[in-house]
Amino acid sequence: MSDTTQRQSPDMWVDPEDDPREQWAHPVGELETHWSYLKMYRHTIVMKCDGLDAEQLARRAVPPSTLSLLGLVRHLAKVEHAWFCRVLQGEAHLPSLYDCDEVPDTDFDGAVADPAVVDEAWTTWRRETAHADAWLATQTDADMGRTVERRGELLPVRDVLEHLVEEYARHAGHADLLRECIDGRTGQ
């Protein structure tokens, strides 16, 4: 019997009572709320990529789009790095991830069906999310109104965190569609 037929809700990734994202479902305070949503969406991306090989992860959505699950992982690593390191921690001098003058969308264009590229993408994404979480662990609700500078504009920390939640939510939707095209799995 397949894994999906053993579940109470075979159309879902896991039964609702077994959903690992539930551990973040009851945050307290503003910082913890933003962080909880971010962790849930991060885990959703991991779930949508689970069990796929390099070719499946690198499979493009619809020509001429370069959108793929692997591209999303690389893109989200780049987003984490840009916002947490370069903006929130003021390390603007750090080079961007997956940037190349000759190739505008290196995060997506470089997402090729090579196990080494897949390993590198996940290693980079995990490193960036761990770095972000380490920084978030030093913050409090009082820090949410503090401002940071980005390209001459002052942004409240809460707005940056909200942007990251929006970014992940949007791409989790993309991941739903990409995964359904690969093997028909949907939902959750």
Image (cartoon, rainbow, N blue to C red):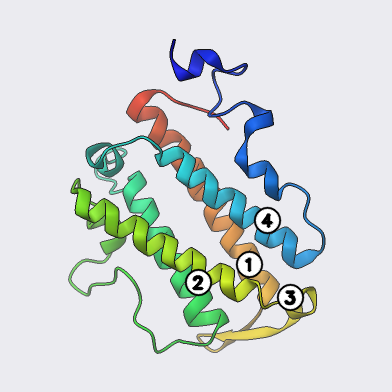
Q: Residues within 10 Å of mark 4 (few under 14, many from 20)?
A: many
Task: Find the distance from the CA under tag 2 to the CA under tag 1.
Answer: 15 Å
Q: Is residue 123 left or right of residue 158?
A: left
Residue beneath label 1, please?
Answer: 161
Cβ–Cβ under 8 Å for marks 1 and 3 = yes
Mark 4: secondary structure = helix
Mark 1: secondary structure = helix
Residue beneath label 4, please?
Answer: 36
Relative height, residue 128 to residue 169 (above, below):
below
Mark 2: secondary structure = helix
Residue at the spot 80% in from the left edge and 79% down from the top edge: 142
Task: Find the distance from the CA under tag 1 to the CA under tag 4.
Answer: 11 Å
Amino acid type, mark 3? Met
Q: Nearer the viewer, mark 2 or mark 4?
A: 2
Q: Residues within 10 Å of mark 2 (few under 14, many from 20)?
A: some
Q: Residues within 10 Å of mark 1 (few under 14, many from 20)?
A: many
Q: Nearer the viewer, mark 3 or mark 2?
A: 2
Residue beneath label 3, please?
Answer: 144
Amino acid type, mark 2? His
Name the N-terminal-most of marks 2 and 1: 2
Amino acid type, mark 1? Leu
